[in-house]
């Protein structure tokens, strides 16, 4: 009787051990699946800078993005910078930014929203007249990762196209940037279906708080060592710091041997 009970206890102990050891494996597996689904399905655009002067690692690969005509950086072997600005509203900084770009002969891209086109039609026309790309940042600047159906997505995009056409008399070039970098794989598919290239970025810094602007030194500490061949740089046109430092910044990058390209050149090189 004692022997039989002993065997039962041993068997029971072995079963408990198997269950205990299996729990972490199951948990780990389900957790990894969630991570993979998030990075490929929806999330916030993010970067990891692993080596100074080199293209950072994005939270989606260039190969994954390319299948949807999406990009975050150009050729990592060519010292070309693609300069972009997000323009959600106007606070008086953009004219100085445009003046500096003109002085350096640099063509940039300005991703605008509906409010910007409606309230700043003359600045939008100036951007176009001076050879800059005006890109689609959606009409209302929503969290696009929460919009999956094509028709709702289309409405945000096409409403801005119509406002742009009314102001400029031209068709908007097909470059789209998700507000706040929030996107889903379905968004990328929707943009592609509408003929758009989705443009993320490979270099940015915290410049968007109007009442907490970085110093010149703080800005340069991010924008100089992290610049890299093929960089798609995101700056905000509402930043007084950016307006103040842009001439010095462009000069520094030029002295480092960089030239400036446009998004249509980026797309042409990468296809």
Image (spheres, helix red, strand yellow):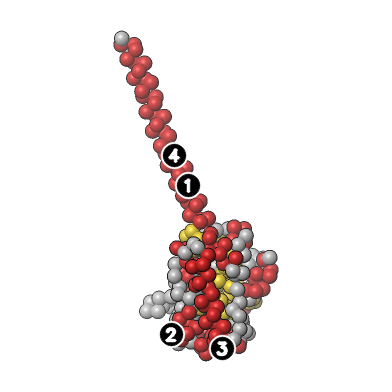
- Residue beneath the point at 39% across and 26% down: 15
The CA distance from mark 4 to mark 2 is 53 Å
Query: Would residue 168 be found to the left or right of residue 113 on screen?
Result: right
Residue 71 screen position, x and y as percent: 59, 65
**Image marks 3 and 2: residues in contact by CB distance under 8 Å:** no
How packed is label 3: few (under 14 Cα within 10 Å), some, or many (20 or more)?
A: some
- Mark 3 or 1 closer to N-term? 1
User: Which secondary structure, mark 4?
Assistant: helix
Residue 22 image point, x, y percent:
43, 34
- In the rendered view, tell whether residue 117 sits above or below residue 221: below
Reading the image, the residue beneath label 3 is: 126
Tell me, yes or no, whether the two marked residues, 3 and 4, touch with CB atoms within 8 Å. no
The dot on residue 91 is 2
* Residue 14 can be seen, yes or no: yes
Is 247 on the left-hand or right-hand side of 216? Answer: right
Q: Earlier in the sequence, mark 3 or mark 2?
A: 2
Q: Which residue, given by chain and number where applicable, does mark 4 sit on?
A: 26
- Mark-to-mark CA distance, 3 and 1: 49 Å
Dot 3 or dot 4, earlier in sequence = 4
Q: CA distance from mark 1 to mark 2?
A: 44 Å
Q: Please tell me in which quadrant of the rendered image residue 7 appears.
A: top left
Tell me the quadrant of the picture where the C terminus can be found.
bottom right
Look at 40% across and 37% down and name the residue there. 23
Q: Position of residue 14 (x, y in %)?
A: 39, 24
Q: In the displayed structure, would residue 166 be above or below residue 35?
A: below
Q: Secondary structure at mark 1?
A: helix
Figure quadrant of the N terminus: top left
Q: Residue at x 49, y 72 (%)?
A: 156
Residue with the mark numbered 1: 32
Q: Please indicate, yes or no, whether residue 101 appears anywhere in the rendered image.
A: no
Identify the residue at the far bottom of this view: 122
């Amino acid at each position: 009787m004692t022997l039989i009970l002993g065997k039962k206890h041993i068997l029971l102990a072995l079963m408990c051990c198997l269950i205990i050891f299996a729990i972490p494996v199951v948990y780990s597996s389900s957790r990894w699946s969630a991570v993979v689904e998030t990075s490929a399905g929806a999330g916030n655009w993010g970067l990891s800078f692993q080596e100074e002067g080199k293209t950072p690692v994005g939270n989606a690969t260039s190969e994954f993005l390319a299948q949807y005509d999406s990009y975050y950086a150009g050729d990592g072997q060519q010292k070309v910078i693609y300069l972009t600005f997000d323009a959600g509203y106007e606070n008086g900084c953009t004219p100085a930014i445009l003046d500096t770009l003109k002085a350096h002969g640099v063509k940039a891209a300005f991703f605008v929203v509906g409010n910007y086109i409606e309230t700043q039609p003359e600045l939008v026309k100036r951007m176009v007249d001076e050879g800059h790309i005006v890109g689609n940042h959606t009409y209302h600047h929503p969290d696009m990762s929460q919009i999956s159906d094509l028709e709702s997505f289309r409405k945000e995009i096409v409403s801005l196209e119509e406002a742009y056409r009314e102001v400029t008399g031209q068709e908007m070039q097909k470059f789209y940037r998700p507000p706040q970098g929030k996107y889903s794989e379905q968004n990328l598919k929707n943009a592609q279906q509408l003929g758009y290239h989705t443009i993320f970025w490979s270099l940015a810094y915290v410049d968007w708080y109007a009442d907490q602007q970085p110093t010149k030194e703080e800005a340069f500490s991010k924008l100089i060592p992290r610049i890299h061949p093929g960089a798609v740089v995101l700056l905000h046109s509402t930043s007084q710091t950016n307006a103040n430092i842009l001439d010095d910044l462009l000069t520094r990058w030029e002295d480092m041997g960089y030239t400036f390209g446009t998004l249509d050149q980026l797309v042409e090189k990468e296809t």
